[in-house]
Image: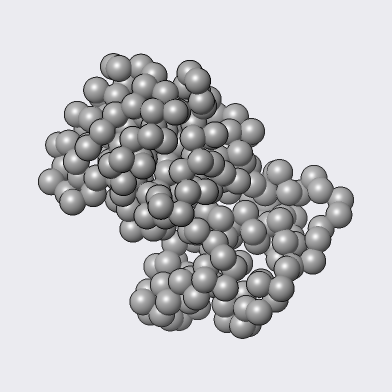
Amino acid sequence: MIEVLLADDQGLVRAGFRSILDDEDDITVTGEAADGELAVAACRELRPDVALLDVRMPRMDGLEAARKITADPRLDGVRVVILTTFDLDEYVYGALRAGVTGFLLKDTEPAELIHAVRVAARGDALITPSVTRRLIGEFAGRVEVPEPGPRLKSLTDREREVMLLVAAGQSNDEIAARLVLSPATVKSHVSRIMAKAGARDRAQLVVMAYESGMVNPRWMRPGR
């Protein structure tokens, strides 16, 4: 059973999400919070598998709450998905930098919300094409690109190849088909890459790939 915490300052929004998620046999909402401070406290008390956080909340916003959750070693098993009505670049990039596992708009379809919770609970990142495009746009404008750190330099050629495809937003199944490998083998590669890089999840791998210069954003512009 996937345990979920809902954090949003609007009670009706929380009620709607609870109704959608509690209808699923493998998902249960174990707690709610009306602001970021309460969300962090609830995560420490309940240790949910997934925390759904609104960006704009009183006392502490969703991004700051996400940073506190992902930085707390006691909450290492909690995956954070950001939900917002604001499709703005600073939220997308800020959320990924904060260590969140996924980013969704509140007008997403119920099936997509349910899918996001399941993907996050597995430890995979929900990085949609729109989010990937924003990352590309963020880094394409940078003049100077740093060298990869020692952790990323320790990757094997195959691991670098897999990481580049992860950075392109491809799933394990898509990477497996591209490289003619089994999904299980790709999953093992991704796990080793995260261990070497010190990444919490795939979302952080994407950020690391761009920030380190492993990926040239101009190679991956839409349409290329």
The total number of labels drawn is 0
- The C terminus: image quadrant: bottom right
Q: Residue at x 45, y 28 (%)?
A: 36
Q: Residue at x 65, y 61 (%)?
A: 209
Q: Nearer the viewer, residue 87 or 220?
A: 87
Q: Position of residue 203 (x, y in %)?
A: 52, 54
Locate residue 106 relative to residue 26 in the image: left or right.
right
Q: Nearer the viewer, residue 50 or 23?
A: 50
Residue 180 is at least partly visible in this image: yes
Q: Residue furthest right?
A: 143
Q: Position of residue 29 (x, y in %)?
A: 22, 37
Q: Position of residue 177 (x, y in %)?
A: 44, 73
Locate residue 33 relative to residue 55 in the image: left or right.
left
**Is residue 57 placed above or below 49 in the rendered structure?**
above
Q: Which of the 4 quarters of the picture holds residue 213?
A: bottom right
Q: Residue at x 49, y 35 (%)?
A: 65
Residue 223 is at least partly visible in this image: no
Q: Which of the 4 quarters of the picture holds residue 205?
A: bottom right
Q: Nearer the viewer, residue 179 or 149?
A: 149
Q: How is the image coloured?
A: one colour
Q: Residue at x 28, y 42 (%)?
A: 46
Q: Position of residue 178 (x, y in %)?
A: 49, 73
